[in-house]
Image (cartoon, rainbow, N blue to C red):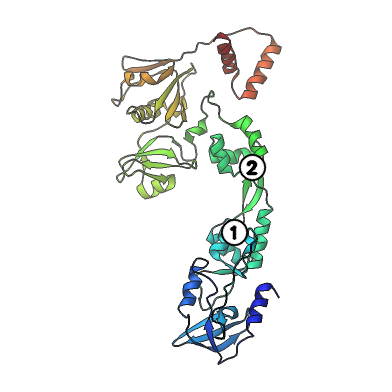
Amino acid sequence: MNKLNHEIKSQSESYEVGETVFVRLTCTEEDDPESFYYFKQFAKKEGVILEVIKHPRLQYRVKFGQAEAVLYHEELTNGKQLEVPKIGTDNQEGWERVKVEWYTQKEVADLLGVSKATVYHYGKQKKIIKILDPHRLHKEARYEKSEVDRLVYEKQSLPTGMSPNEVAKRLGLSVQSVYKYIQDGSIKAEAVPYGDERITYVISETAYHEAEKSLKLSEIQRPKKFEYYQSSQDIVLFQKFHSSKVPEARVIRNKDNEWGFYLPNIQKWLPFEEGVREYQLMPVYPIHQSTLEYKGYVELQIPKDTVVFYPFVDYLYETWGMENIRLREQDHTILLFIRAGERPLTTKGFFAVDILPFLIKGDIYIEEDQLILRSAYRKTSLELPIELLESMTKLAEQEGISMSKWVEQKLSSLLK
């Protein structure tokens, strides 16, 4: 017999049919509001035992005037001790301190870190035992304490670390990319149970720092395709969409790196699927064009809040195509790398002079209605010893950059 049952047994033996009883307030409003208000309706009312129910636990069917209730033994008193101290807590820390025989569905969810729906499935799968309540006396489902405590203990013994979502944020990657790197072994992670027969991954601090050295995006590297292009939906960052319901929507990612739409007129973000399904959003223009011959890149850095930003990005996606653009979103600006070449200037949304203040490297000008971009780089060749070239290649790979970029950095530092 546990401590709780011992205390209850010592306070009163089991009641008999016809015996007079009263409801005891065994909890406070703060502890369990549902039970508190249920008990309160019978507070100080005299009840009569109509039936003794011994399974699965000792309880009684009690008549209070015109109302009936089914109550557990510990929720009743024989009237000789109406003011019985409620079952409280001891001074232990953690989830073990609560001296009760059951948890509500919400308490189980909080303890295990899962949703209430998952708790329901745990009950169906017999991972935890749901307490029968045929008369629906409690507003929330209740589960036996022992099995829940066992699951909590098992969870505490699982490896700790960062989730794939946290790693994605810290490395500046998409969550999909992190999962891909976990699958190919680039990020070491441990699989742990999660929710209803699913698994998630935990990345330790050591594993994170190892991945950071090889995967974290460097400011000196050109943007990677996944930074601005979502292949599964064939969309790009800041792409313009619209519908009969929404005059303008822009593709953006939220703080969790999830792709969706921002609706400027109501200042609301929507998941991508919801925007397409509920608002029938469609792209305003195509985003694919043939890839230009490589002649270097023109580099720009444009503030997000400047008037020319959206017209210029729309023009680039529609006329140059995402194949000829590399884009990186920063806190307040956008870093753009555009392949050198020329394309028709078909838009009236901006002038070439509007974008010149944001030019970092290269040259931009117009000739005969053609927007011409010239790279600041000129291809050259150097004859060097093979051993030196091999050493330079290894050093560049360690820093995650091309050998040309590595040579440029070293020469720039020497010429300063």
Residue drawn where x is 58% and y is 62% of the image: 108
Q: Quick one: 286 or 69, which is closer to the camera?
A: 69
- The residue wearing badge 2 is 203
- Residue 111 circle label: 1
Label 2 or label 1, whichever comes before in sequence order: 1
Q: Measure how far apart labels 2 and 1 are at the Cα level.
A: 22 Å
Q: Is residue 221 above or below residue 412?
A: below
Q: Residue flagged by tag 1: what amino acid is it?
A: Leu
Quarter of the view holding residue 146:
bottom right
Q: Residue flagged by tag 2: what amino acid is it?
A: Ile
Horizontal and vertical percent position of residue 47: 50, 87
View extreme (bottom): residue: 18
Horizontal and vertical percent position of residue 326: 47, 26
View extreme (top): residue: 383
Within 10 Å of disc 2 (Cα), the crowding (few <14, some 14-19, many 20+) is: many
Q: Secondary structure at mark 2?
A: loop
- Residue 294 circle label: none
Q: Secondary structure at mark 1?
A: helix
